[in-house]
Amino acid sequence: MMNDRAKTLLVQLQAEVDLHYPDWKIGELEVAGSGLECLVCYANSAVHGPAALRIPWERWSSNDNDASVDGRKLLQQEATLAAHLFGHGLPVPQVYACHTGESLDFLASAFIANDGSAFASKDLGRIVAAIHAAPLPDFLPLAQDGAPLHEVLAERLARRAKVVENLTGVTLRLPDYGGLASRLELPGARRSLLHMDIRPANVLSYQGAIAAVVDWSNALVGDPALELARIAEYGCLGTDFLAGYGNPDCFSHLPPGVETLYRLDTAIMLAVVFLSEAPNPDLAWQKVNRVLELQETLISEW
């Protein structure tokens, strides 16, 4: 059932498209899905055929993982990265328009049929490898804010650890920002585009085949092992995935403690999500306990 905010956005979106893109001749809009950041609508266009229109719930949002997130800039990043990867043959939706207006911003792209069917982990591994092998975009993603990867990770590990402590009363014993940044700096490490949220919700499938990878809000540029550590913490880095990816020893180049820090980046983020953004006490404490487990591993490696 649509909430009032979704109904309002649908009316505004219909008016905005009719005004600025009359040649599209879209039919009646339908809600196709929603998440914490965006509403996704379905439209049938005389020009493009089935299309997906993605609208931020609000221009600005803030949460305990990230403060002052600009929904407009995230849409623009999504459009730019999708166009970049589509041009290199990656499975992403074709972008039709990224519209910014006084009352509403939206991203229009090809609608990808998604039946949620199970797909082969090996196929996902191949696609992630292709993303990591693709030419880099000519900008650093928003989550990086112009900074090198080791500084980004050190800052958010330290900041989000404080959030976990404040929300739970648990005391964490992680190194300070300087210690984290020093350990995470890897001169000469490979630099790739990282999606940083490869999970079933962002992998569209149809009849058992992967149709598209979507949602580049968390993208970074840096060591592919960081992405693989995140996928591992999501529970998806099995032998089939690694066979498709083509590198079963994907962490072997890392100095002691770095793989653990990469995994902590995900575990702490998920703990904050389930403590605050999408509260779920059982999952929250599972992730907090995982943070404590990784902390002990880090202490032994440090």
Image (cartoon, rainbow, N blue to C red):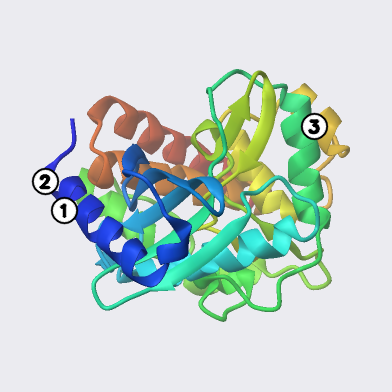
Q: Is residue 154 visible?
A: no
Residue 16 falls in which quadrant of the image? bottom left
Q: Which residue is mark 1?
A: 8
Q: Can see residue 46?
A: yes
Which of 215 and 29 lies nearest the eye of the viewer? 29
Residue identified by numbered label 3 = 242
Residue 172 on image: x %, y %: 37, 50
Nearer to us: label 3 or label 2: 2
Residue sitting at 56 percent across and 32 percent down? Answer: 113
- 24 to 138, vertically: above or below: above
The kind of secondary structure element at disc 2 is: helix
Q: Amino acid at mark 1?
A: Thr
Q: Determine whether, in the image, residue 150 is placed left or right of residue 159.
A: right
Marks 2 and 1 sit apart, C-alpha to C-alpha, by 6 Å
Residue pictured at 80% horizontal, 45% vertical: 129
User: Residue at (24%, 62%) from the top-left corner?
Assistant: 58
Question: Disc number at residue 4?
Answer: 2
What amino acid is found at the position of numbered circle 3 in the picture?
Answer: Leu
Give the farthest residue toward the bottom.
146
Which tag, 3 or 2, sits closer to the chain's start? Answer: 2
Circle 2 packing at 10 Å, graded few (<14), some (14-19), many (20+), is few
For label 1, the SS is helix
